[in-house]
Structure formats: C-alpha cells, structure tokens
C-alpha cells in the first residue's frame, strides 16, 4: 500500500513500530484514519503536545527561583 503526503504529494514511508506514516520531504508524521465502515481514508495529522511535563516543571522552577532572588535582593537593599 502506497500513501502520498497530503501536504507535498511526496511518497510516505510507514513506520510499523509507531504505526504512523512519515513524509521525508516535509518531515511530518501522519496516522491512518479509519472511518466507521473500516475503510481507510487519507492519513490524518498527528499533533504533538507543545507543553510536556518536563518543560512546565522547568519553567515553574525558573520562575520560583527568580522570585526568590528578587525577594532576597529587596531584603538586602533595605537599610537596617
């Protein structure tokens, strides 16, 4: 079975491990969409999550450290 990329019409390769199609020209991943009649349609785009748990945790850590740094600098700037 040969599938073509809906974006650039390049022939795609099937990645059996992840069960996705990959277009090497536009570097996008697609998955096979099956409708109610079990007939294969054009592949649908696989969206990637923009915010992973690791990124959210890292940004939260940086924000907390910046706030603590500002509080400490403010405390040290007040004359006693």
Image (cartoon, rainbow, N blue to C red):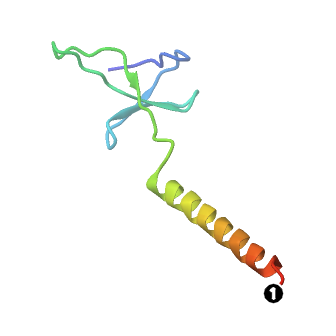
Above or below residue 49? Residue 73 is below
CA neighbours of label 1 inside 10 A, class few (<14), some (14 to 19), many (20+):
few
Q: Quadrant of residue 20?
A: top left
Which residue is pictured at 59% across the width and 66% down the height? 64
Residue 79 position, x and y percent, is 84, 83
Residue visible at 32% across and 20% down in the picture: 1
> Residue furthest toward the front?
80
Image coords of residue 16 (percent x, y):
32, 39
The residue lying toward the viewer, choosing from 15 and 34, is 34
- Reply above or below: 3 against 59: above
Residue ID for mark 1: 80
Residue 40 location, quadrant: top left
Task: Say whether residue 18 is left or right of residue 56.
Answer: left
Q: Is residue 20 above or below residue 65?
A: above
- For the view shown, which residue lies furthest in the bottom direction? 80
Q: Quadrant of the C terminus?
A: bottom right
Image point (46%, 38%), residue name = 48
Please state which of residues 74 and 17 is positioned toward the viewer in this rendering: 74
Residue 17, image quadrant: top left
Which sits in the foreground, 63 or 20?
A: 63
Q: Where is residue 62? Give x, y as percent.
A: 62, 64
Residue 39 coordinates in the image, percent (x, y): 21, 14
Q: Residue at x 81, y 78 (%)?
A: 78
Label 1 element class: loop
């Amino acid at each position: 079975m040969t599938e073509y990329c809906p974006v650039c019409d390049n022939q795609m390769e099937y990645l059996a491990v992840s069960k996705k199609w990959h277009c090497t020209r536009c570097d996008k991943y697609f998955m096979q969409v099956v409708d109610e009649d079990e007939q294969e349609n054009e592949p649908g785009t696989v969206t990637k999550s923009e915010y992973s748990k690791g990124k959210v945790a890292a940004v939260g850590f940086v924000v907390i450290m910046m706030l603590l740094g500002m509080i400490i600098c403010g405390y040290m700037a007040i004359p006693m």
